[in-house]
Image (cartoon, rainbow, N blue to C red):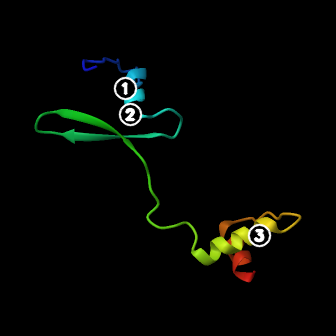
Amino acid sequence: MSGVIMASLSSKAQLTLPKRVRELLGVREKGDRVGFLVDEKTRRVMLARIDLVPAEAPYTERELRRLLKLRKERGGRTFGSAEAFLKHLRSL
């Protein structure tokens, strides 16, 4: 179905995406991102769902193997920072 779907700006110039637009874009929950493609010449704006993809894997293959090994350890352990956690991984 094509057609115009309207929404009004709030007093803070914010806009709530209408339900049909959210459904079409596939945005359903807090944190989902919407991108705006702006054509200044025609003054048109297109919306698209944005899926962020990490530029690189969060762990090396070796770190992942160590993570899986850690999972099997008993007693669990917490770390004060990501650096402390990675240091522990490297010591395994």
Pointers 2 and 1 in contact (C-beta within 8 Å): yes
Q: Which of the two residues, 7 or 56, is positioned nearer the viewer here?
A: 56
Q: State yes or no: discs 3 and 1 in contact (Cβ < 8 Å).
A: no
- Total tally of numbered discs in the picture: 3
Q: Secondary structure at mark 2?
A: helix
Amino acid beneath label 2:
Leu
Tag 2 and tag 3, C-beta contact below 8 Å: no
As drawn, is 12 to the left or to the right of 57?
Answer: left
- Near mark 1 (Cα within 10 A), the count class, few <14, some 14-19 or many ≥20, is few
Q: Amino acid at mark 1?
A: Val
For image coordinates 74% across by 76% down, the residue present is 88
Name the residue that disc number 2 marks. Answer: 25
Q: CA distance from mark 3 to mark 1?
A: 44 Å
Which one is earlier in the sequence, the residue at label 3 or at label 1?
1
Q: Is 62 located above or below residue 48 in the figure?
A: below
Residue type (three-letter) at the residue carrying disc 3:
Leu
Q: Position of residue 34 (x, y in %)?
A: 39, 39
In this view, which residue lies farthest toward the left? Answer: 41
Direction from residue 82 to residue 2 in the image, left or right? left
At 24% from the left and 18% from the top, the residue drawn is 3
Image x and y of residue 47, in percent: 31, 36
For disc 1, the marked residue is: 21
Residue 20 in sight in this render? yes
Q: Earlier in the sequence, mark 2 or mark 3?
A: 2
